[in-house]
Image (cartoon, rainbow, N blue to C red):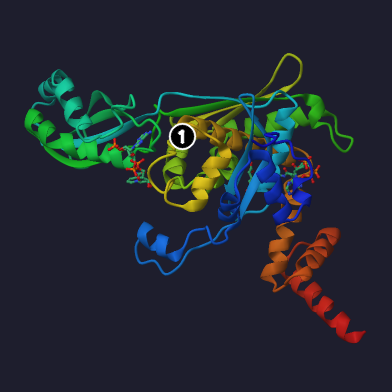
Amino acid sequence: MGTRNSRLGGFYQLNPFERLQAVKAFDGLNDEDLRQLHGGNGALTVERADKMIENVVGTFNLPLGIATNFQINGRDVLIPMGVEEPSIVAGASYAARLVREGGGFHASTTEPLMIGQIQLVNITDPQRARFDILANRDEILAMANNQSNSLVSLGGGAKDVEVRIFETSPMGPMMVVHLIIDCRDAMGANAINSMAEAVAPRLEAISGGRAYLRILSNLSDRRLARARATVPAKALERDGIRGEDVVEGILWAYSFAAVDPYRATTHNKGILNGIDPVLIATGNDWRAIEAGAHAYAARSGHYTSLTAWERDAHGNLIGTIEMPLAVGIVGGATKVHPAAQTSLKLLNVKSASELAEICVCAGLASNLAAMRALATEGIQRGHMGLHARQIAMAAGAHGNEIDQVAQRMVAEKQIKPARAEALLAELRIIPTQN
Ligand SMILES: CC(C)(COP(=O)([O-])OP(=O)([O-])OC[C@H]1O[C@@H](n2cnc3c(N)ncnc32)[C@H](O)[C@@H]1OP(=O)([O-])[O-])[C@@H](O)C(=O)NCCC(=O)NCCSC(=O)C[C@@](C)(O)CC(=O)[O-]
Ligand SMILES: NC(=O)C1=CN([C@@H]2O[C@H](COP(=O)(O)OP(=O)(O)OC[C@H]3O[C@@H](n4cnc5c(N)ncnc54)[C@H](OP(=O)(O)O)[C@@H]3O)[C@@H](O)[C@H]2O)C=CC1
């Protein structure tokens, strides 16, 4: 067993090999696990990829970083993040360090209940049909649960039936039946779709209508994850700016997102900056979470922030987040992609709910990092300082040239492709002149 202390100050100053050793010391991962994280022989092979999707010609790599400093429900966690954008991993680690000073994140989830929808049309007497479908609830649930080999024995499966009537639509009236399904540790899409397709003929017979769509809803608003964090005002003190003033700035940043959908969209993008990379690293479906997150943000009819920020009686900053988070630790690609398996092992989660809790904490942390930067020095110093290396590489820099060009651009505060090209040309001329 490793040290299990995720407070790894200066982790970023190590090289990738040294970082892997620190991860190994944290968790006691074995060498095979490390190879999978590192992308060596254990990583996704073309042969395996060819069995995952269609028309495969290769694999597409992304950087895998480790966010440090997270403490969630009293447990230290190192969070793997697969992402192409610089400063996300740094920002999340920084914010987790700040939250750690306030006692870490507190997270929870609702039951993993999802919705399967069956669309019924051409029903002459919808009120009678609704009554009869509900009267046959137990039979419908039993038919749905016949589709599952293990969900029911694990305490999950189809739990309830609901009926909604739409008086009008572009094609006329329709009825939508919801199957409420407890998906346990699976994201559940395939399980739900099988159940929805299985019960549709019976629903047609009861209602006298015709079933068209039979599919899950990605607005999984019965499967919510929540987290709360406290940041002592003192922890936010920096470069001569008082912590109280940083709190004030962050609260104005939040207020902007709360009232203005143009700002809320960017604010929520900053939250998903923390969540999507964890979904990718663990082989989860990030399109499903993105769709659910934005729909949930608009549930009142006004698109708004997925987080809320306030000040407590002592002047400390309090942040909360609540959003749908349908993730799995079984099913989909979670058990197929070798690095996803290792990421789940590193996270040491025993249930899909625990993974969802980690995801919302990463989202809350990313939101805090972005707002702190935006409300103080601006986003460009931290973000562009780290993005400078990508600009240097895009300009053609290799090896040592990358850091040399990036450092010059940061020092000059001119982080631009044209400047990178000029500096690179300069760097390449100097050695030949000597
Ligand atoms: C980038 C930092 C953290 C630098 O911040 P800094 O002040 O230069 O950092 P520091 O040197 O004081 O170090 C503080 C901690 O940050 C971490 N850290 C520091 N440097 C590194 C690094 N190189 N690599 C990895 N981690 C790093 C590390 O955890 C370190 O502590 P330690 O644990 O070592 O004791 C800060 O400027 C920041 O948080 N910026 C915001 C980053 C961010 O939000 N990026 C997202 C991209 S922009 C975007 O897409 C979203 C947005 C902004 O539009 C959303 C919105 O509008 O709301
Ligand atoms: N709109 C969307 O979001 C859609 C998404 N998808 C894709 O569907 C995939 C996810 O579907 P999902 O149904 O989760 O995956 P799978 O069908 O791969 O796996 C889920 C199944 O695993 C079995 N199982 C074994 N142990 C457990 C456990 N502890 N908890 C829960 N189930 C367990 C259950 O089957 P059993 O009970 O039979 O043993 C369950 O139905 C993702 O790849 C997603 O991209 C697909 C269609 C639409």
User: In the image, 92: left or right of 12?
Assistant: left
The answer to whether residue 178 of the structure is visible from this angle is yes
x 84%, y 64%: residue: 408
Quadrant placement of the N terminus = top right
**Residue type for callout 1:** Leu
Q: Quadrant of ligand 2?
A: top left
Quadrant placement of the C terminus = bottom right
Q: Secondary structure at mark 1?
A: loop
Q: Position of residue 323 (x, y in %)?
A: 49, 31
Residue at the limit of the structure toward the bottom, as seen here:
433
User: In the image, 433: left or right of 113?
Assistant: right
Q: How many marks?
A: 1
Q: Position of residue 90 (x, y in %)?
A: 70, 46
Q: Residues within 10 Å of mark 1 (few under 14, many from 20)?
A: many
Please determine whether, in this image, residue 416 is positioned above or below residue 72: below
x 21%, y 34%: residue: 168
Please determine whether, in this image, residue 105 is positioned above or below residue 285: above
> Which residue lies under the disc numbered 1?
325
Quarter holding residue 269: top right
User: In the image, 411: left or right of 188?
Assistant: right
Q: Nearer the viewer, residue 275 or 384?
A: 275
Residue at the limit of the structure toward the top, as seen here:
313
Q: Nearer the viewer, residue 270 or 35?
A: 35
Q: Position of residue 109 (x, y in %)?
A: 48, 25
Q: Position of residue 138 (x, y in %)?
A: 17, 21
The answer to whether residue 370 of the structure is visible from this angle is no
* Ligand 2 lies under 8 Å from the Cβ of mark 1: no
x 72%, y 29%: residue: 100
x 70%, y 55%: residue: 17
